[in-house]
Image (cartoon, coloured by chain):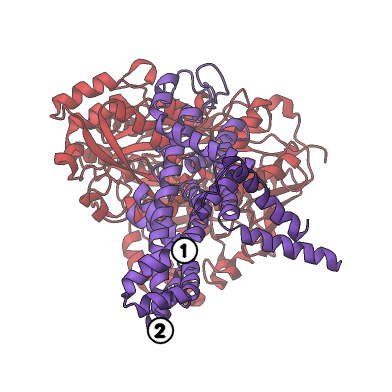
Amino acid sequence: MSLTDLEADASLPAAEEVAAAGPIQGRSPWQLAWARLRRDKAAMISLAIIVLLIVMALIAPLISKWIGYAPAFGDRKLGITEDGLPVGLNGHHPLGTDRLGRDLLVRAVYGARISLIVGLVSTALATILGVVVGAMAGYFGGVIDTVLARFMDVTLSFPYLLFAIALAAAFGASTPLTVLVITFFSWASIGRIVRGQVISIKQREFVEAARSLGAGNIRIIFIDVIPNLLAPLIVLATMTIPVAIVFESTLSFLGAGIDPRTPSWGNMLSDATETYQVAWWTLVVPAAFLLITTLAFNILGDAVRDALDPRSERLFAAQKAGRKKKK
Amino acid sequence: MIGRKSGLTAAAAIGTLALGLAACGGGSGGSSGSDDGKPKKGGILKVVGAGGQDNLDPTSAYSTVSSALQRTYSRQLFAYPASKDPKAASTPVPDVAASMPTLDNGGISKDGLTYKIQLRHGVMWNSSPAREMVAGDFVRAFKHMCNPASPVGAPNYYVPNIKGMQSYCDPFLKDKKLQQDAKGIADYENGHEISGVKALDNYTIQFDLTKPASDFISLLAMTFASAVPVEYYQYIPGSVNQFKHLVSAGPYQITSYDPNKSITMDKNPNWKADTDPLRHQYVDKIQVTEGQGSPEAVQQQLEGGTSADISLDQPVPASALGRLAAKNDPNLTVNGPPISNPYLVFNLKSPNEKKAMQNLKVRQAIEYAINKVALAKVYGGPKYNTPLNTIIPPDSVGYQDYNLYPTNGSQGDANKCKQLLSEAGYPNGLKIKAAYRQAGNHPAIFQSYAQDLQACGITVTGVPVPQADFYSQFLQKTDNTIAGKWDVAAPGWVPDWFGNNGRSVVSPLFDGRNWADGTSNYGGYDSPVTNGLIDKALEAKTVDEAANFWHQADQQIMKDAAIVPFMAQKTPWYHSSKVKGATWLPIAQQFDFTNLWLSGS
C-alpha cells in the first residue's frame, strides 16, 4: 500500500459525506476520530462486547435470581457429585459448577463486576496519578524532574508480584487493596510517557505565548498542556484496563487478591487448577470471560489509537512501504 | 511436644491430597492380596520425591520419610507388622524382642513400672566382622538420645518417663562443647548410666519407669528407640559422615549416599530372614532419588512405571485422584488408620464479639451447623473419608462411636444452630474471623464451613495465612490467640504413631497446662476434668484401662465443644504397576519397602 493510497482511504469517505451534507461543515478532531473509529468493525464489535459485559455486571443480581443461586452458595444437592466433583453443563447450572457446587455462570457475571471495577477504578486512579506526577516532572524540570523521574524508575523496578503478595499477607486481601496495588504499579509507566510528552509540548510556541501573556504555571499545565495529552492518555488508559484486569486475576489466582469466596475470574481460575482435568468447564468458563474481555479492550485500545492519531498509522505504513521497496 | 511429623509437613502433604472420584481403587490397606500372587525376588525399587531433609540417624530423625527408610536398616525391640488390617498394622509386635511382655507373663511388673524384655538371638549387625545385636545396643540407644549434637526428636516421650533419665540427660544436653566432639560424647555415655535402663545380660534388658505407661511398647516401637551400634561413637551424631557409615541390622544397607540427592540400598548379606519376623528381602536394590517436589511430575513417573515405583513424599495430586478412580486403577490404594484432618478448632481465648468463642452455647451451635458431608467431599468424598464426631478417630485406642451433636445425615442443621445462638445471647448472629492456609484444599474447606456458618447467621471473615507460616508463625503464637487474631481455624494433625497413641494426640492437643508458644493446643482449651483424665490415661497400666480414660477424655472435650471434628481421613497413595504386595506402614505414612516385591523381574 502506498502513501497516497492510504491518504485517499482516509479522506475519501469524508469527502463523500461532505458532498452529501451540502454546505461544508467544520469538524473537530474528536468528530473525525469518532468517524474513523466507527468504520473499524473489530473496534465496534469490541465496544459492543464491553457494553454487554457492563450490562451483565450491572444486572448480575437479576441473573443470579433467574438461575436461582447466589454467587457464593455451594449447591450441595445438584451442584456436586457424591465424590465431590463438579457437575457439567445442565438445566440447573447452565455453565456447570465448581468443586464446591457453585454456579459458574453466576460467579462469572459477578466476576465481571470485580474485574471491571478493579480494571476501571485502578486505571482511572493510575491515570490521574500518572498525569499529575508526569506533568509536574516534565513541566518544572530540574530538581523536581530528577526526583520524580527517579521515583517513577524506582516504582517501575519493583518486583511487583512479590510486593503485592507481601502486602496482601500483611494487610489481608481485599478489593480496595487490590485496586491500590494495581494503581501503584500502573501509574509510573503512564507518568513516564506524560513526562516525555510534556517536555516536548512545553517548548511549543503556544505555551510560550501563554507565558508571555502572563499565565501562571498551573494555568498553563491545565489549560494548555494537559488537553494536548488527551489523545495519548485515552489510548494509554484503554490499554491499561486489560492489563489491570489480568493483574487482578493474577493476584486472585495466587491467593493474594480477594477473599476466595468473592466471585472473581482469578479466583475461579485458581479453583480450576484442582479440577480442570476432570471438569474442563471450571477452567474454560472463567478463562473465556477473561480472554474475551481483555481482547475486546485491547482491540478497542488499538483502534482508538489509530483513530485519534491517524498519523501514526500512516507513518508506520509508509515505513513499511519503504522497507518493502528496499527489498 | 510433637514435632514436625505431626504439624507442618505431614499436614501439608495431607492438605494436597484429595478431591477424588472414587469409583474404586483398592480397599482400605491396599488392594486385595490375592491378585498379587506369590512374592518374587529381584528388581530395583525406585523411590522418587522431594526429600531434601535427610536425617538417617535413627535416634534423632523425626519424619515419616526417615521412618520409611529406617524400616530397611534399623531394628527396634518392637515394630509394626505388614498387614492389610489397619488395626493390626498399628499394633506393635516383637521385632528384636523375643516375646511381648505383659502383666500376665511377668514381663511387666504388677505396679506397671518395670519392663523386662528378652532379646532374640542371632540378629546381626553388618559390621565387619559381623557382630550380634545385644541388650547393650539398646541401652546405648537410650543414652544416645540425649547427646547434645543431635538429640532424640521427641524427648518428652522418654526422658520424664524413664527412671534416672532426666538426671542423666540434663548435664549432657547442656554441654554444648560436646556438639562437635564425637569422642567426648562417647566418653560421657560410657561414663554415665541411666538407672532405669539396664542390660541384665546380653539378651535381657530392663526398663524402670517413673510412672506406669500402657503405651511404653509403642514408644519402644518408634525409630527413636532403634538399637545403636558402637560404631556410631566414631562420628558426630546426625552428621553426613555418620549417614555415610550407617551400620545396618535390617534386610538392606546403604551402599551409596549423596546428601539430599540420592540414596542407594543393597541387600544386607548379614541379615537372616529367620531372625526377623517382620521384614523381607524381596527386591534386590532400593534406589531413592530426591529433588522432585512436584506431585504431578512424580505421579506421571509412577504411572509411566519405568523411572519411579513409589513416591517418597509427594501426595497423589488431587486432579489425578479423580482420573485414577474413574478408571478403577488398581495401583491406587486408600490407607488407614484414618486421621482427624482437618478439624475446626475454637480460639477459647478470643476477646472478639463479647468473648463469643468462650461461650459454650456458641461453640455448640457451631457443632450443629457444620455440614460434614460437604467437607468430606472436598477431600474426595466417602471413598476417602467418613464424617467424624469424636476426638479419637476409628482404629485408634479409645475410639468409641457416639455423637453429641447429631444432625440429619451429618449435613448440618442451621435452625438448631440459630436456636442455640439465640439462647447464647446472639439472636442477630455474630462476626468471627477464620484463619485458613492458602494452599491445597484449605481454601475450599474454609469456604465450605463458612457457608454453613453463614446459613446460621454467623458472618465469617477470612484470614488467609501462608502455608509455611500457618502453625509456627500464627496458630502457635499465643499472642495471636489472646489478641483474637483468629476465632476459628482448621488445622490438621498426624499422630507420631497409631494405635495406643493418646500421648501423641489427645495429650498435645487438649492438655491445657503449660500453655505457651509452640503449643499444639491452639485454642488454649483447659479443662481440669480433661487434664485429670489425660493423666489417668497416660498412667494406666493396661491398654484397655487407658482406652477407657481416653474415651472419657474424648467425651469431655466434645461436651466442652473445644473443636469440631470434620472427618476421619484415609490416605490415598499410589505405586507403579510393577509393585505387588504393597502394605501400608502407618507410622511412616508409606508402603513398607521390606514387604513388597516387583513383578516381571
Q: Residues within 10 Å of mark 1 (few under 14, many from 20)?
A: some
Taking the spot 78% from the left edge, 59% from the top edge, the residue there is: A2
User: Percent position (x, y) of residue B132?
Assistant: 62, 57
Chain letter for purple, please: A
- Give the residue pinned by disc 1: A229
Residue lying furthest right: A327
Task: Give the residue type at disc 2.
Answer: Gly
Q: Which mark is residue A193?
A: none
User: Percent position (x, y) of residue B225?
Assistant: 48, 53
Specify the quadrant that holds the N terminus of chain A.
Answer: bottom right
Chain letter for red, please: B
A204 or A106, which is in the foreground? A204
The answer to whether residue A47 shows anywhere in this view is: yes
Pair 1/2: label in front: 1
Q: Chain of mark 2?
A: A
Left or right of B32 on screen, residue B525: left
Q: What is the secondary structure assignment of the residue under circle 1? A: helix
Q: On the image, which quarter does residue B234 sit in?
A: bottom right
Whether residue A163 is situated above or below residue A277 in the rendered picture: below
Taking the spot 26% from the left edge, 19% from the top edge, the residue there is: B415
The answer to whether residue B500 shows anywhere in this view is: no
- Give the residue pinned by disc 2: A142
Using the rendered image, report if marks 1 and 2 lie on a common chain.
Answer: yes
A133 or B434, which is in the foreground? A133
Q: On the image, which quarter does residue B259 sit in?
A: bottom right
Specify the quadrant that holds the C terminus of chain A.
Answer: bottom right
Whether residue B484 is situated above or below residue B127 in the rendered picture: above
How far, Cα to Cα, is label 1 from label 2? 21 Å
Q: Chain of mark 1?
A: A
Taking the spot 49% from the left edge, 65% from the top edge, the residue there is: A189
Task: Give the residue type at disc 1.
Answer: Leu
A144 or A231, which is in the foreground? A231
